[in-house]
Image (cartoon, grey):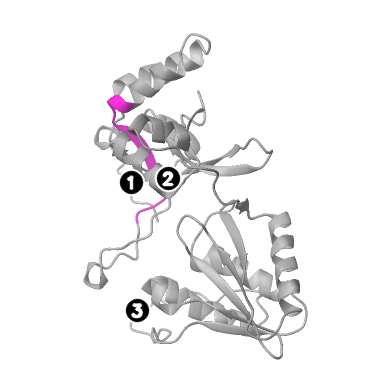
Amino acid sequence: MALKSSNPKRHPSAGPRLARALARRVSHPEGASQADLLEALMAGPVLIGLREMPLAFEPARGEEAIVQLVTEPVPLADGDEERVVCGFADTRSLADLAPTAVPLAVDPAALLEWIAASALAGLLLDPRGARVLVSQADACRMLGLPVRSARRRSTSVDAGTETAAGEALERLLTRAPGARTTFREPRTGKSVSFERTEDGLRMALAAAALAPDELERAGLLLEGLAGGLEGLPDLPDDKDEDLPAASADPVALFSGDTERPVRAAMKVFGWVYGFLPGFALEIEET
């Protein structure tokens, strides 16, 4: 559930210089240089969008909370795509892309520093208009940081990636018991691991790395697996109901082909972790 003021006057605003520069880029693409636009960006602030406010945030259990930013896929030089964080000139341009998103005004230097430190592909300004990409290399140069070398390859989760995941598990089945394959979202480190057992595969999630709501959904997912993975039970309405024990790692055992374990892994990323379609995935075989 998004939490967003219905009063436009209460919405944060981006820097007027950035808004004007992006408008010029749309009306006169040849007359607005990248350098001028980057200078306008640094005058700040810049708007980003939160898909929704984190509902599971519990200060008594720590200060961490997972938020989902508005992102957009951009083509890479090798023909692949990667999702980048979106920046906006005003709340109207944000609403054009994500009507229910919550606008957040941030300092551009802090945003670019985060992009550089996280090895993200970059920042896409005005995705429904000017579509100006501020790459990670641009961010490093603007902050006076060394430009990173090529990053580890990751792919978008689609039918091709699910095929690659299935092939990785097929290889795992040919290896000795104890061998492991891990699927990981590189930006957050969220992962699902599979271990070769005597009879098949063992899927595991580290309970210590799960937020309370993720642990709850993981327990319900295992119940869904027992029922054939056709659907997932609803989250309990009464928060006093019994929840999965935090001390045990959620695990599931599979035998036979790799179709069900691959589908289970995708359910973990999409339902337990809450990633939107198009998230990145790395496959590590050890």
Q: Amino acid at mark 2?
A: Thr
Q: Which residue is mark 2?
A: 100
View extreme (left): residue: 60
The tag earlier along the polypeptide, 3 or 2, is: 2
Tell which circle, 3 or 1, labels the residue nearer the N-terminal end. Answer: 1
Residue at image mark 1 = 4
Which badge, 1 or 2, comes first in the chain's sequence? 1
**Badges 3 and 1: C-beta atoms under 8 Å apart?**
no
What residue appears at the point 40 percent right and 84 percent down from the top-left corner? 243
Q: Are marks 1 and 2 in contact (CB under 8 Å)?
A: yes
The structure residue drawn at horizontal position 68% and vertical position 80%, both measured from the top left corner, is 228
Question: In the rendered image of this protein, does residue 274 appear above or below residue 152?
Answer: below
Distance between the Cα atoms at labels 1 and 2?
Answer: 7 Å
Q: Is any part of residue 13 visible from this angle? A: yes
What range is drawn magenta here?
42-53
Q: Which residue is mark 3?
A: 239
Q: Amino acid at mark 1?
A: Lys
